[in-house]
Image: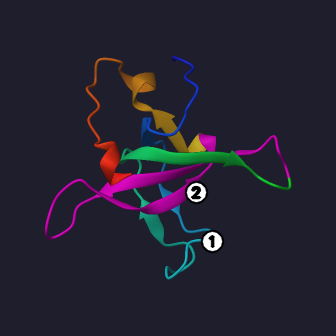
Amino acid sequence: MINIQLQPGDTVLASKDIFNDGSFPDTEESQLLVKSGTRGVIINQGYLEENENREVFLVKFEFESESTTNELGPPIGCWPEDIRAIADIDPAIPVTIDKHDA
């Protein structure tokens, strides 16, 4: 596997199903937010105030709506183990998410 430093603007995949841990507003706790394999784009990154060694990423994942496909949803906070760079899977996969949507 390629070790890639993730940064805002990078396209990623959810490496596992992501559920609401209680921090996502207007959604029931434990509700599925993103299915494993869903494509998204990192819009910000940072660290926990309580633990500067714990990195967190803000990611907008694609979802299908009635009006369009591949629309970006609301930002979701993700741990590094929740996401992986598409290039980690196959560097030949073309990546085309318009950053204007981010």
Residue drawn at the location 51% of the way across and 42% of the way down: 83
x, y percent for residue 67? 13, 68
Badge 2: how crowded within 10 Å, few (<14), some, or many (20+)? some
Q: Is residue 98 left or right of residue 69?
A: right
Closer to us: 7 or 21: 7
Q: Which residue is mark 2?
A: 77
**Position of 77 relative to 87 (above/below):** below
Q: Is residue 63 left or right of residue 87?
A: left
Residue drawn at the location 51% of the way across and 40% of the way down: 8
Tag 1 or tag 2, which sits nearer the N-term? 1
Which type of secondary structure does the marked residue at label 1 adopt?
Answer: loop
Res 23 label: 1
Closer to us: 96 or 99: 99
Q: Which residues are magenta?
A: 51-80
Inspect the image, locate mark 2, and give the three-letter code of the amino acid beneath it. Answer: Gly
Q: Do the CB atoms of the residues marked 2 and 1 lie less than 8 Å apart?
A: yes
Residue drawn at the location 60% of the way across and 41% of the way down: 81
Q: Does the image show residue 16?
A: yes
Closer to us: 43 or 30: 43
Does the stretch in magenta take in 70? yes
Which type of secondary structure does the marked residue at label 2 adopt?
Answer: strand
Does the stretch in magenta take in 87? no
Residue drawn at the location 49% of the way across and 79% of the way down: 27
**Position of 77 relative to 94 (above/below):** below
x, y percent for residue 80? 61, 41
- Spatial CA distance of label 2 from label 1 is 9 Å
x, y percent for residue 10? 44, 35
Task: Determine the residue located farthest toward the front in the rendered image.
Answer: 100
